[in-house]
Each structure stands twice: as C-alpha cells, then as structure tokens.
Amino acid sequence: LPQHTNSWSKGKMIMYKYQDFWSIKHLIEGAILAQQSFKAEPSDVFLCSAPKTGTTWLKSLSFAILTREKFDESTTPLLTKFAHECVPLLENSHVVEHENIRKNLSLPLISTHLPYASLPESVISSNCKIVYIYRNIKDVIVSQYHFGREALKLSMEDAPFEEAFNDFCKGVSGYGPYWDHVLGYWKASLERPEKILLLKYEDLKSEPKSNVKRLADFIGSPFSVDEEKAGVVDNIIKFCGFENMSKLEVNKTGKINGSLFENRFYYRKGKVGDWMNYLTNEMKEKIDKLTDEKFDGTSLLLK
Ligand code: A3P
C-alpha cells in the first residue's frame, strides 16, 4: 500500500493508503477483515464519522437515547464506561478478528470511520441505518492535530502545526481526504434519505434539542410528549454535554486496553471555532479555497 510518514510526527506516524483513504496499519487491517466477514443486521445502527468530528458525543447521545427506559443520568453505564466501549469501532481489528463484536453488543450500535465507499457490502445492502456526523473542516484539522500529537507524546514545539495542516490539505489525514469522506456520505444520503441521517456538529451545539429529537426519531426511538414534558430530552443533552462528560472520572483517567489513545484525549475543548487560535490568514484562505473547489455544486458548508 502507498505509505506516508507525517513530517510533523517526527517520523512516528506512518499512514497507509487503502482503497481511497489514509489510515494507520491496524485500522486498515481491521477494515479489511470487516469487509471480508462482517454481516450487518437490519436492526443495526451505524454511527459513522471521520475522526474528530464529534463521534464520542454522537455515541453517548445515541447510547443514552436507546437505554433511557432502563437508566437515567444517575444510573447510566456512561458514568463509568467510556463511550467508545459502550459503542465499539467496527474496524478495531481485535474486535472483528475474534468475531466478538455482535456477541458483546448490548445494543445494536456500532461505529466506523470508514468512508461510505469502503463500508462492508452488507451495511450498504441491508436495511440498517446510518447516522453520519461531520464538522467544520478547520476545527477538524486542529482537533486531529492535537489528538495525534498527544498520542505520540509530542509537544507543540516538537510537532509543527503547519506541517500537520499541509498534510491535511494533501488529503493525508485520519481516513482522509476529509472532503471525500463527507461527500461520500452526503451523496448517499441524498439517494437514500430513509437510510442515512446527516448531523452537523455545529448544529448539535447550537440547536441540541431539535437535533437530538431528529436523532432519536431516526434511530427508531422517538421521545413521547410525556417524556419531553418530563425533561428527558433536556437531561440527556445535559448529561452528554462536554461540560459533564469531560469531568467524569472515566473520561479523565481511563484508557481502552492496548489503545494508544487515553480517554481524556477525546475530550479536549469541545468548542466551535477553536481553529481561529491556530490557522493564519494564509492557511484559512488556502483551506477555504480548497473546500470551495471540492464542494462546488453541493449545499455543503464546512467553512
Ligand atoms: P476538540 O479537539 O475540538 O475539542 P471524536 O469524538 O470524533 O474523536 O471528536 C473529538 C472532538 O469532539 C474533540 O474536539 C472533543 O473535545 C469533542 N467532543 C467530545 N465530546 C464532546 C461533547 N460531549 N460535546 C461536544 N464536543 C465534544
């Protein structure tokens, strides 16, 4: 496979191109295994995203929605179990290899970062649902940079942001090119709106209630009028919000077995527009121009 060593990573981050996306070795191995052997069920809900677009948040919200009859915010497993353990990543090779993914699922929720074109065939052909979350590209660049840097234990001085930015622009980012990732799901959602729901990180932030209700409706667990009156929607939004989640012990200190990534790396700032603290005017113009070109003729707004 074509290979790229990210210069900002001091040679520590090696990415490979498989099909049309870039990722790290063990996730590509997991993707291949999943493509060969994973069988989707019509009742499955896939939470799909490029890394750093709000996956953890979407997992917590979906989990809280589907388990609300059994648990409230003082009893939910999310208090002590990391969101990425509550909802596993399909291409985590261990999970797929040991065929444990379905056996260990408490709910039919599975996540993946795979682009639409690389999903296992049964995910496309079965009647399972897909929720895709996406986010302002400039915030994704900053978020991916910090996540990779922290995992590799590099300071900002050691890992020049500009180099990470340039790699991202060339398409060499987690499951990048990011534009293609978004375009794949966006196009599919136009063709199959009953199967694919698109949610935008910024919309979830600015209008959480209507978007969480859309999510619940789509995954087949709509809130009743009584539940809404009793504040169930508001409680889920508050519980799953950055303020609360980032303060939980499990999210401050834990780590999934064998993972490079500590749980706390998934909760950095949780803000819209942090890119303004990192991108120069020149970088902003470059990425906006690229985005205009890539999204020409679409209604997508990622700037
Ligand atoms: P920042 O690095 O900009 O803070 P993912 O879950 O796809 O890995 O994305 C991680 C990004 O989502 C990080 O962004 C993280 O802080 C943010 N995030 C995590 N939980 C969140 C929440 N409950 N609400 C809003 N943002 C959240």
Image: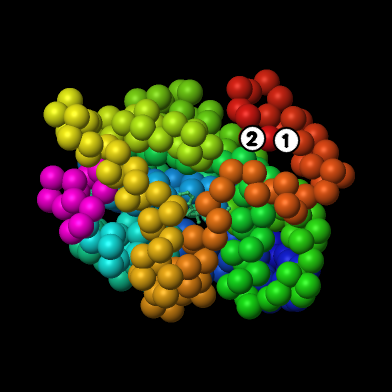
Q: Quadrant of the N terminus?
A: bottom right
- Residue 166 makes an appearance in the image: yes
User: Left of 141 or right of it: where is 29?
Assistant: left
Q: Secondary structure at mark 1?
A: helix
Q: Are marks 2 and 1 in contact (CB under 8 Å)?
A: yes
Residue of label 1: 291
Residue 173 image offset from top left, x and y in percent: 66, 55
Q: Secondary structure at mark 2?
A: loop
Magenta span dominant secondary structure: loop
Residue 42 sits in quarter: top left
> Is 90 drawn above or below residue 10 in the view shown?
above
Residue of label 2: 302
User: What are the residue bounds of the magenta stretch?
Assistant: 64-75
Residue depth check, mark 2 versus mark 1: number of the one nearer the observer = 2
Residue 55 image offset from top left, x and y in percent: 45, 51
Q: Relative to the observer, which residue lies in front, 287 or 280? A: 280
Q: Relative to the observer, which residue lies in front, 277 or 149? A: 277
Q: Specify the color scheme.
A: rainbow
> Is 99 drawn above or below residue 69 in the view shown?
below
* Magenta segment includes 78: no
Q: Residue at x 76, y 31 (%)?
A: 293
Residue 165 image offset from top left, x and y in percent: 76, 54
User: Left of 236 or right of it: where is 183?
Assistant: right
Going from the N terminus, do you reach mark 2 or mark 1 first?
Answer: 1
Q: Tell me the amino acid under the disc marked 1.
A: Thr
> Is 149 drawn above or below residue 169 in the view shown?
below
Q: Tell me the amino acid under the disc marked 2.
A: Leu
- Residue 120 makes an appearance in the image: no
Q: Residue at x 61, y 28 (%)?
A: 300
Q: Residue at x 61, y 22 (%)?
A: 299
Residue 130 sits in quarter: top left
* Magenta segment includes 70: yes
